[in-house]
Image (cartoon, rainbow, N blue to C red):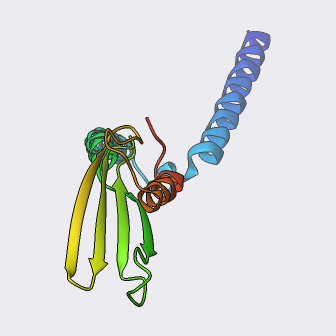
Amino acid sequence: METVLIIVTLILLGAVGYTLREVILLKNRYGQFLQGAEAKTIERLLKTYSHDVAQVDHKLEQLAAFSAKLHQTTGRALTRQGFVRFNPFNDTGGDQSFCLAAIDAHGNGFVLSSIHARTGTRMYAKEIIKGESPHHLSDEESVALKKALDVKLPFPQA
């Protein structure tokens, strides 16, 4: 009988040692949760964290949708410009005439030209579709358009 008690005691001591080792490992891994906390407090913390993660996930989905809309909108914004000043006539002073090309990420937009002369100023606008105009472009307009097309996009093109 004594031998049985000694064997049971040794088994219990082994189980206690194993349990103590597991508790120490848990404290090392999850010490921030277990410091002075009761089981209900830990459960409450985990529920709070779970709720917070769900809220962050929801906000992340909202931000992703907003980002997609923003990317779509900025693709249509006239984010690339090219500007050229020139003197079309020898008898006037200064480069008071100009061409302004304004295009979006897809190469759509316009070229606006202003020709200044002694008798007045005239303005012309020509449509740009996918980097090209259905109308003849002057040399200055072509340079302004090339400058606009060479501008690096501020965001990756989808």
Where, by quadrant of the figure, is residue 15 drawn?
A: top right
Q: Residue at x 44, y 75 (%)?
A: 86
Q: Tell me if residue 6 comes above or below residue 126 in the rendering.
A: above
Horizontal and vertical percent position of residue 3: 79, 12
Vertically, is 7 above or below 69?
above
Q: Nearer the viewer, residue 13 or 93?
A: 93
Relative placement, left or right, of 151 versus 21 is left
**Residue placed farthest to the bottom in the image?**
93
| 44 or 36, nearer to the observer | 44
Residue drawn at (41%, 90%), measured in percent from left and top? 93
The residue that appears at 29% across and 41% down in the rendered structure is 72
The residue positioned farthest toward the front in the image shown: 91
Q: At which x and y percent is residue 118?
A: 26, 86
Pinpoint residue 41: horizontal percent, then vertical percent. Answer: 34, 48
Q: Residue at x 40, y 41 (%)?
A: 132
**Residue 141 or residue 68, whichever sits in front:** 141
Could you tell me which quadrant the N terminus lies in?
Answer: top right
Q: How many marks?
A: 0
Q: Quadrant of the C terminus?
A: top left
Q: Is residue 22 above or below residue 40?
A: above
How far from the left and from the top, in percent, is residue 148?
Answer: 45, 57
